[in-house]
Image (cartoon, grey):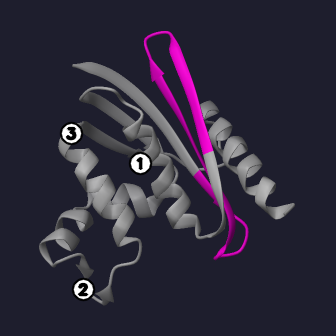
Amino acid sequence: MKHVTIYTDGACSGNPGPGGWAAILRYGGHEKELSGGEPETTNNRMELLGAITALQALREPCQVELYTDSQYLANAINLGWLREWKKKGWKRKGGELKNTDLWQTLDALLQTHTVRFHWVKGHADNEYNNRCDALAVAEREKFQQI
């Protein structure tokens, strides 16, 4: 099984507002950058889309080390929130689960790939997280100009 490293980030101006997401996939000596955005979205949706799009880009089941500065995303996996939401019919303890469509998509991808989520401090000294941030912000800015 191939070992892939992925860095993801999301950016949003307002919540909701224009947003962008980005991912960098690293395998061997190769790197691939992915990015996109939406005119009216939330930061959490952009964080999720970065991870989802990166995992969807993998052509076969892989072992993945995924780095994100989103505690929402990392904690949902590492603290078992996603597992609990799924058990409860995609509901949280407090009621409605936001972004259910994206959580269900991510959950399906986690059945294909073996993924370990790592939280990294945003806007710090992680070169790849900073590159992802710049890509996501550039995508967000495309929608701010519309």
Dominant SS of magenta comes to strand
x then y, percent, for residue 116 = 29, 40
Residue 135 horizontal side relative to residue 76, left or right = right
Number of marks in the image?
Answer: 3
x then y, percent, for residue 94 = 30, 90
Q: Could you give the CA–CA distance between mark 1 and mark 2, rounded to whole angstroms?
A: 24 Å
User: Mark 2 belongs to which amino acid?
Assistant: Lys
User: Mark 3 belongs to which amino acid?
Assistant: Thr
Residue 35 horizontal side relative to residue 60, left or right = right
Residue 142 horizontal side relative to residue 127, left or right = right
Q: Which residue is mark 3?
A: 112
Q: Is residue 91 visible?
A: yes
Q: Could you give the CA–CA distance between mark 3 and mark 1, rounded to whole angstroms?
A: 12 Å
- What is the magenta range? 10-35
Residue 72 in which image quadrant: bottom left
Instruction: Decide: is 29 above or below 12.
Output: above
Residue at disc 1, secondary structure: helix
